[in-house]
Image (cartoon, helix red, strand yellow):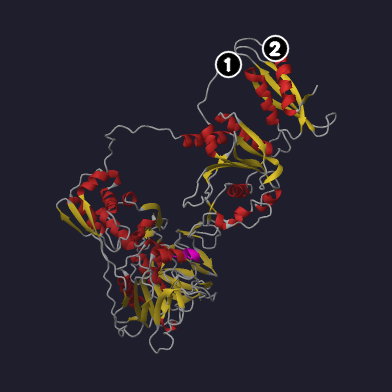
Amino acid sequence: MQVPLKWLQEYVQVDVPLEELAHRITLAGLEVADVSYIGQDWDPELVVVGNVLAVRPHPNADRLTLVDVEYGGETPTTVVCGADNLRVGDSGARVALARVGARLWDPYAEQPKQFTLKTTKIRGQRSEGMACSEKELGISDRHSGIILLPADAPVGMPLVDYLGDVVLELDLTPNLGRCLSMIGVAREVAALLGTALHVPDPQPLQQGAPIEGQIHIEILDPDMCPRYSAALVRDVQWGPSPTWMQQRLLRAGMRPINVVVDVTNYVMLEFGQPLHAFDYEELRPQPGTDGPPAIIVRAAQEGERMTTLDKEERLLDPDRLLICDGQGPVALAGVMGGLESEVTPKTRHVLLESAHFDPISIRRTSQLYHLPSEASRRFERGVDPEGTTWALRRACALLEELAGATTAQGVVDVYPRPWQPSHIELPAREVQRLLGIDLTAQEIAAQLRPLGFPCTVEQDLVQVEVPSFRLDVSIPADLLEEVARMYGYDNIPTTLMSDVLPPQRDNPVLQVEERVRDILVGGGLDEVITYSLTNLESIARLLPAMPPVDGEQYLRLANPLTAEREYMRQSLQNHLLETLALNLRYQERVAVFEIGRVYLPREGQELPDEPHMLGICLAGRRAEADWLQDKAETMDFFDLKGIVEGLLTHLGIEDARFEPADSPTLHPGRQASLWLGQECLGAFGEVHPVVREQFELPDLRVGLAEFRLAPLVEAVGARMYEPISRFPAVIQDLAVVVDEQVPAARVAEVIRGAAGDLLRELSLFDVYQGSPLPEGTVSLAYRLHFQAMDRVLQEKEVNRLRDKKIVPALEQALGASIRS
């Protein structure tokens, strides 16, 4: 919400510095995200209000004129002008005059750039200044004509004093829908500053015929439309809105269009009640009747269509609320009007709509058709159900004043579900109990009344009536929040706990998660957080043939924000691959991981199982390129395996093992599964080439892993430290020839079991296949470190251990032989 300060001051007196105002309303919950200064760079001596004395033709150019302007100096100045809204013979117009030396914005520059205005000759005629457009003053991008100020603008006044302003940009949370209006913000400011709130009391002349009999209104769905009000204005004089209204709209973030649309937008910004204008003569009566045009509020019917103002024909979803005339839809209720009843320069008579709609219905319609608007934004957060007729009176009065319209007597107000005020009892002791503030009931009432809450005090009890514009207040806790805001969060005293601290308990799951994060970040990976919601197409890309995915096997959101975020994920893999593809567009090396939940439906239960998963994804250069190497090697399966092994080592998990895997997402022969005891934690490996292409990844080896985190948490125990032996180790190499199908981990397991405690380290350092080895076999060379804690091992003792225990164990368990 953008709040021009001058507009705000029409409703509340602001007598504190701007910085203090921004600070106080921010602490009250209306965060001031930014402050913009309009006219800050306008020199008060050189950019002033000017009065056009005469507009003469340029002797050497048909499209240019010579404009004589007085500005309060000794003599008028003459400027050359090419604006189409200042014509030969005009006089008396007020303009924004920039004199020589003023700093203006270049309207023709591709990037914003200022220039200093100089005396120039244009087609042989001297120009001593410029009559400015909005773009040259930096107000907006409009450059088609110069700014024409109101006739009562004081000649010679610095333009910064007349047209300058300060705009507060408020970042409002969804519960602050009441502050999506100038009067709503003014009410908050008045309560904070202790000043009066001035709300206009519009009284249109209503000199037309009574509205009864000129429009028929019927609500068929009062649950979604509890109230519908309408007013009729005739003989609208079409044209632009006045400069003051256009400037206010621009500063509030809306584009001026024409006097009718601008008035409806102005009232919405002022009061928070969206309005819609229909071309009255385009509305049709109900078929088979001679009655007046009709407005019928109902749900859409199967197969119904309409064309909205953006010229898109839309197939209407049943149960979406429509505004219809006697023969069909003319608007998506609360979201966007229809093209058939749009007001145009040919419109003479206008029917104004001011309604109250169900917020959930408007939200669903806006999301379904991807039509966010200022009106739907307000309806979604809740508007004042009692404010429909005030907004109509305000709009009619403005159209009478600005467009010469004639308002019909009265309004049509169909109100099948009248708003019923609620009452809340607030004991003073609750304020002390929950806020720690010692206030009497009278003081509590004094905090609430300026916000519009009528209060009565009965001893220690405050009886509060909730006003119609506070749809967010329904329980005592809501009132306590209001008391805290008005009292000032920064004024609430700081207190220490008066009780003993509760016992501190470990959270092993969180602790292990943090250790995993630290280990992986230390290994050169970056953590990512992806959406928990996905779509079936993304899931299907994990399989080479992209078979259809059965959505019934996934948890689906009832009202997804977008089709891309419709189903709860059951794997981290697809989002990790999408993240990798996106980042590889800009980087040559990407290595990321994620710790997050997946959502697995449980048969017969409403809530899913939500296990924590660890996902790892990497591709690209193994190391940064430098001048020592022409081409850096790329990462592959073994880089990923090394990361997994490093993680297990740092977690102190020693009994993990790798076995073959058969995941269709991963490359056959370049994948493995991770096991702890008899439990499989998941698989890792290189991504299948077809899957890689389906995710639009470059032609690189892509590593992908996903493991269940709970077994890792359970396997991490207290770390046991052992003394370091002061005796030297005996190192021997052993080359074992086994069948090529035997995993190296199985060979190492047999060696460790046979060697016992004297074997301190075991590492595989060479793998060989080929002549003279028999076909189908492989040679695995291991380096063994033997060391005792109490003595120096002799070579003879180590040889005996090798020949009598290790080698026989390998021969018996694996049919292995020792390569000489």
Q: Residue at x 40, y 33 (%)?
A: 505
Q: Position of residue 707 (x, y in %)?
A: 58, 40
Label drawn at residue 797: 2
> Which amino acid lies under the numbered mark 2 shown in the image of this protein?
Glu
Quarter occupied by residue 499: top left
What x and y, as percent, mark residue 775?
Answer: 83, 33
Q: SS of the residue at dot 2?
A: helix
Q: Quadrant of the C terminus?
A: top right
Mark 2, Cα crowd under 10 Å, few <14 / some 14-19 / many 20+, is few
**Residue 415 inside the magenta-drawn segment:** no
Q: Amino acid at mark 1?
A: Ile
Q: Is residue 32 left or right of residue 418?
A: right
| Residue 368 is covered by the magenta coloring | yes
Give the SS element for disc 1: loop
Numbered circles on residues, count: 2
Res 551 seen here: yes
Instruction: Name the disc covering residue 734, or none.
Output: none
Q: Nearer the viewer, residue 526 or 510?
A: 510
Q: Main secondary structure of the magenta part?
A: loop
Name the residue carrying label 1: 724
Q: Is residue 700 left or right of residue 551?
A: right
> Magenta span covers which residues?
366-373
Whether residue 86 can be seen here: no
Identify which residue is drawn at 47% across, 50% down: 607
Q: Residue at x 65, y 10 (%)?
A: 792
The alpha-carbon separation of the residues under discs 2 and 1 comes to 21 Å
**Placement of 459 over or under 276, stated as above or below:** above
Residue with the most extreme right position: 772
